[in-house]
Amino acid sequence: MKVLFVCSGNNKNFGIVPFIKDQGESLKSEGVAVDYFPVVGKGLLGYIKAGFRLRRFLQKKQYDLIHAHFTYCGWTALIGAGRKIPVVLSLMGTDANGEYKGKNTVVLKSKLSSFLTWLIQPFVSAIISKSANISASVYRKQQSFIIPNGVDLEKFKPLSPDERDGHLASSGKKKVLFLGSRTKTGKNFALAQAALQQPGMENAELISPYPVSHEEIPWYLNEADVLVFPSFMEGSPNVIKEAMACNCPIVSTDVGDVKWVLGNTPGCYLASFDPREFAEKIHMALHETRLTGRTNGRQRIIDLGLDMDTVARRIVDVYKRSILGPYEYSSVPKSHVNPARTETTI
């Protein structure tokens, strides 16, 4: 099977966003040959122009399927494919639900993406949502699949104190790690700051190293005492699963599928947007893991089938269904990953 990934090439920190590249590489172990077509150019017009560049590109190379990541890339893929090649669309969150700038407050201009997500659905063969709150925007339920991104368990794993390389300098204080952008309103860095200013948090310091390379993230997660994730809205945040795979304690707001991923893992807590409660949950996470400093989150990831190989097999099932049609491809095994949240279980 030959698949072309159509994805944004506009990220100034990465040529291709790491989780998209990791997903593509994981599919190769399932016998899928993956190429990448990064879209360079912003705004809807930029993606439309990229569609015609893609059409010229496809005159020279043949693929069985195009997998587009984000709604705008979906339109690029459809223009390029010209209905000759099936297109699978992965929704990322902001394209379906809008970009949040506060609790229940969406940036007005992002509503265009939501409209385009609604408009594109009859033209694609399948839609992959990362979580249930994203899939709520999908009305073509027979084409809808909920498949979170998988975690590379070889890359994200617990390290002993001797294996760590000192990304976080010792200060005698507990390290509270925030890995998001400090300036992106939806990531809500202000809540993390406010929580660390609460009484009783004097022995903790907030670490916010963004931007960091994806290769460095496992080191930060292993050296931090707790990861904080105060976002206003998410789909299936990768860093939560990566932290779980490293057995890092977590305090997060109840966004996307975080509640399901954390489960009842000791040392991992959900908190409200109130700074006092958020600080209290940080204290609880630190107290609960005071003996070992770590959690058993990695086992939770394994139990949920969120390792990269299991997720890759689910995606390949969607590809086969899209190429062959749902009736020809009727012998696909049922998935054990989050079946209650999958519109079409395969």
Image (cartoon, rainbow, N blue to C red):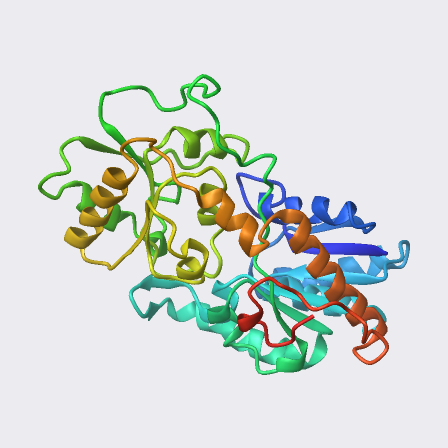
Residue in the image at 31% along x and 70% along y = 104
Q: In this view, does 269 lie above or below 248?
A: below
Residue drawn at the location 85% of the way across and 62% of the way down: 64
Residue displayed at 44% across by 42% down: 243
Q: In which quarter of the image is residue 118?
A: bottom right
Q: Position of residue 152 (x, y in %)?
A: 60, 41
Asked if residue 9 shows in the view, the reply is no
Q: Quarter-wise, where is residue 311 in the image?
A: bottom right
Quarter holding residue 70: bottom right
Can residue 333 be seen here? yes
Residue at point 55% right, 61% down? Answer: 43
Where does residue 140 sit, x and y in percent of width and height?
63, 82
Query: Could you say where residue 50 lies in the image, as x and y percent from the top left?
Result: 70, 59
x and y percentages locating residue 87 in the rendered image: 74, 68
Q: Which residue lies furthest to the top in this view?
A: 162
Please tell me whether residue 42 is drawn above or below residue 83 in the rendered image. above
Image quarter where the N terminus lies is bottom right
Total count of labels: 0
